[in-house]
């Protein structure tokens, strides 16, 4: 977002907290390779999005995120880093959006702590970047693992009424 986006202390923004990119297997982009960033940001602007969160399934592509964030910022759009994490809870795994502060990757150590978290929560699980892979931790343990990094984040439960959402995930088996 532009530096004066909150010039008067507050501002109404349309937000989308569940965005995917071409780093995600479900996302399809058929345009010119060298125009991807422009097209992505233009689509956000055309939809009136002022704030978005990139939440690919069980993965975080730092280079792609930085490029999108930089391009979006030039258009007055804020982008936050995130992941759509498939935690092991529930009948089909509960899809949980984890939204991170930039300090998870923009730090003096130059460590991508988002990837470090993914390596911890999917330790020993092959192909965990697949949408259907489940982490090793339930929701409570996921929060504990995230807290171990001592960085800001928040959770949003995705498509809560779907089979891989919070309500259906914890419904008794029939």
Image (cartoon, rainbow, N blue to C red):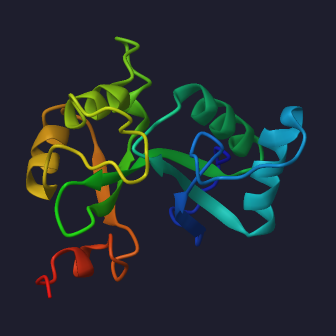
Left or right? Give the position of 51 relative to 56.
right
On screen, 172 above or below 35? Answer: below
Question: In the rendering, at what x and y percent does residue 67 appear?
Answer: 67, 31
Looking at this rendering, what residue extends furthest in the top direction? 109
Q: Quadrant of the C terminus?
A: bottom left
Left or right? Give the position of 121 relative to 82.
left
What residue do we see at 41% from left, 13% from top? Answer: 110
Front residue of 124 and 165: 124
Question: In the rendering, at what x and y percent does residue 165 appear?
Answer: 31, 73
The answer to which image quadrant residue 139 occupies is bottom left
Evaluate whether residue 160 shows in this view. yes
On screen, 42 above or below 125? Answer: below
Front residue of 143 and 10: 143
Question: In the rendering, at what x and y percent does residue 55 appear?
Answer: 48, 51
The answer to which image quadrant residue 122 occupies is top left
What residue do we see at 29% from left, 58% from top? Answer: 155
Looking at this rendering, what residue extends furthest in the front direction? 174
What residue do we see at 62% from left, 32% from top? Answer: 64
Left or right? Give the position of 17 relative to 66.
left
**Count of marks, rendered view:** 0
Evaluate whether residue 6 shows in this view. no
On screen, 7 above or below 46? Answer: above
Question: In the rendering, at what x and y percent does residue 125 appear?
Answer: 26, 34
């Amino acid at each position: 977002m532009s530096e004066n986006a909150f010039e008067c202390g507050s501002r109404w923004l349309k937000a989308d907290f569940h965005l995917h990119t071409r780093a995600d297997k479900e996302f399809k982009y058929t345009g010119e390779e060298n125009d991807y960033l422009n097209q992505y940001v233009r689509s956000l602007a055309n939809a009136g999005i002022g704030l978005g969160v990139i939440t690919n399934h069980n993965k975080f592509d730092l280079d792609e995120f930085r490029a999108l964030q930089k391009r979006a910022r030039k258009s007055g759009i804020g982008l936050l880093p995130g992941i759509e994490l498939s935690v092991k809870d529930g009948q089909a795994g509960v899809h949980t959006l984890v939204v991170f502060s930039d300090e998870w990757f923009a730090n003096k150590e130059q460590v991508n702590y988002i990837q470090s978290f993914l390596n911890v929560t999917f330790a020993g699980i092959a192909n965990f970047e697949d949408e259907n892979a489940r982490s090793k931790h339930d929701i409570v343990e996921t929060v504990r693992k995230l807290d171990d990094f001592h960085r800001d984040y928040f959770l949003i439960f995705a498509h809560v009424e779907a089979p891989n959402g919070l309500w259906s995930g914890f419904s008794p088996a029939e």
